Image: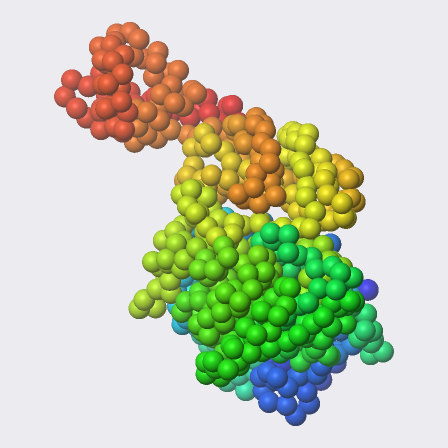
Amino acid sequence: MATPLPHADALTAEEKASLTSGKSFWESTGVDRVGIPSIYLTDGPHGVRKQREGGDHLGIGDSVPATCFPPAVALGSTWDPQLLERVGNALGDEAKAEGVGVLLGPGINIKRSPLCGRNFEYLSEDPILSGRLGAALVDGLQARGVGASLKHFAANNQETDRMRVSADIDERPLREIYLRGFQHIVEHSRPWTVMCSYNRINGVYASEDPWLLTTVLRDEWGFEGLVVSDWGAVNDRVRALVAGLDLEMPSSNGVTDAQLVAAVASGELDESVLDTAANRVIDLIAKAVDGADASADYDRDAHHALAREVAGRSIVLLKNDGILPIDPTAGVKIAVIGEFARTPRYQGAGSSQIVPTRLDNALDELRELAGSSEISFAPGYALGGADDAGLVDEAVGVAAAADVAVVFLGLPGEDESEGFDREHLELPAAQTALLEAVLAANPRVAVVLSNGGAVRLSGWAGRASAIVEGWLLGQAGGGAIADVLFGAVNPSGRLAETIPLRLEDTPAFLDFPGEAGHVRYGEGLFVGYRYYDSRDAAVDFPFGHGLSYTTFDYSGLTAVQSEVGLEVTVTITNTGDRVGREVAQVYVGVPGSVAVRPVRELKGFASVEVGAGASREVTIVIPSEDLAYFDSASAAWTVESGDYTVTVGASLRDLRASVVVPVTGDAGLAELKIDSTLGEWLKHPIGGQILGAAFAQGAGAEMGAMLADPAMLRMAESMPLNRVASFPGSPITFEQLEQLVAVVNAQVHAAS
Ligand code: BGC
């Protein structure tokens, strides 16, 4: 039951204006006179960053301790919505215990370039994966009566000049790549709030873009919640309110509230617009009040255990020649090398930085699980320090005396943060030099990586025996790494982003981060794997890749079109001797498409646990809406009729089986126009017949005979018929053409 609160019509213009902006950095404004309270909105996304009383404004590094779950880069690698829903539940419980009404997340922006400084806060380079996983986080959080804030809406794919830059994107990639995940979550999970981004899109600030905030978000997608600004994203408060931005955060100390009141008084702003925004704020407050529970608490140990489970599920085993897992009962001498083993890098910097309830490190956790193994340690490098030959020599000595070396490498914390982008994909030179020295002393090396954004591995990946991509794993990551190295957890993470061979190979390389206030998304639809795959270009590790300590077979693939979309069924058999989890990925291509398309695109997936030697049949449903592409000509989502190639794989480059399914798309033939080309006429099912008949006799016969010559036909195909009509001696007049167009289009309408 919603708590009854007064509506905007009970308030003065000043009170309404004050409601639509913050009281402080983290609180909305209430109206005491009529009993409207304020609520807390707090970061987010992978933990609760509630500022301490009296702490600094931003509260970074000074928030109340909370469980630091794995950041989005790790969560994305789980490919498991059910698991993420549990994370959402836990985040909701913690937010509630801290009296927080809205948690500022999830962030679902697409990883357009691996250089984006905030990629650790985002889930994937693919919108279907980001949309599904983001929806699960929203569902889990909101099930606890705490609102989500889906961010950053939209096209905030870089940090360089993020508060002003214009992301210049054609509508089709904007819809299909950058908005698609937002659309899915808004339509299916109904987040209480959406946070508009700082940047401009095609020249217009997201905070004051009526097309984005009203036409698309509300009119097309049916959003009924509240739009909040990113902190400081409002450029012109009156214009923003009119565009559909309801709540400005943080407080402007009343300055912009007064602008709204003045605009209402002068008639520049229709008061009903202010009423609408104020009512949306009141609705949000009512929901938060309903969800609140002053006695709420959570079990810190249970949440730490969940953080460890999720971290274990996030780790991606990129390579393994059999060196892993290490048997803890076999008396193996293990050299643990690298400062990151002792001082973990577990989250990124900026507004998402959580003060953890506790912090595990891999070295202690490995010792804990070591059994009869012997563990020695050498830091190998100093974080933030200069190269140190002594540290390398010590590490080489330790490695040489061991059976196996586990080398922890990664990006220094200062390389990755909100607010700026990375400039390269390289690990620190001191770390790669250490690795080379260790490899020379003992070739049995497993590398464990800690990095929020993809790094180049291609210089040494071929020579390491195993590579464990640990991303940033949150406060319990140390234990999760130990679990995977010793085989207590069978790795099941899969890459949610491609690891390229070189920065120069990446799709946005020539168009990132732009210049003179604009960044042109020149690669269009071809973002991430869509680019590498369509160019058949080599990558280091492909999208969807991740190994297990067991192996899986795929069989019996079928795909049928049903009322809801495509139903894809496949049987997965665990052909190894230990239980494991496989992520079956369904890629769809439309080879004969009328539209430009990537060779194949992820359309569905399932994460399933299969016992040793057992088989499981999995059905993955791809809703019709996910089969649609955005047709630029009609500016509408369209499911094309035709033969679709449905491929199931263990990664984009480990495709296991394919079937071709005829799909009946949206009815509706395209209309013809007077400037449609001869080729378009002839290919059109109705136009082709009518034109064919006209060319078979009378004045058209000569033209018909000419076009019977394939070379002539090929040359003439690209000619618009209205141009043909204006030629001297044309077999068709302009008036006749107009009549033909009318006849064809009448039949098109009758058929649809
Ligand atoms: C970030 C948001 C964050 C907000 C509040 C902004 O700078 O872009 O992601 O939620 O600050 O800290």
Q: Give the residue displayed 70% in from the left and 60% down from the top.
A: 326
User: Image height check: is 265 above or below 444?
Assistant: below
User: Image height check: is 275 above or below 381?
Assistant: above
Q: Give the residue displayed 67% in from the left and 50% down from the top.
A: 548
332 or 632, which lies in front?
A: 332
Q: Residue furthest bottom?
A: 54
Q: Residue furthest front?
A: 401
Q: Residue furthest left?
A: 728
Q: Where's the N terminus, which quadrant?
A: bottom right
- Give left or right: position of 582 versus 319: right
Q: Quadrant of residue 279?
A: bottom right
User: Image height check: is 441 above or below 722?
Assistant: below
Residue 66 in percent (x, y) is at: 72, 77
653 or 644, which lies in front?
A: 653
Residue 574 in percent (x, y) is at: 73, 41
Residue 268 in percent (x, y) is at: 45, 72
Q: Give the residue displayed 60% in from the left and 33% down from the top.
A: 657
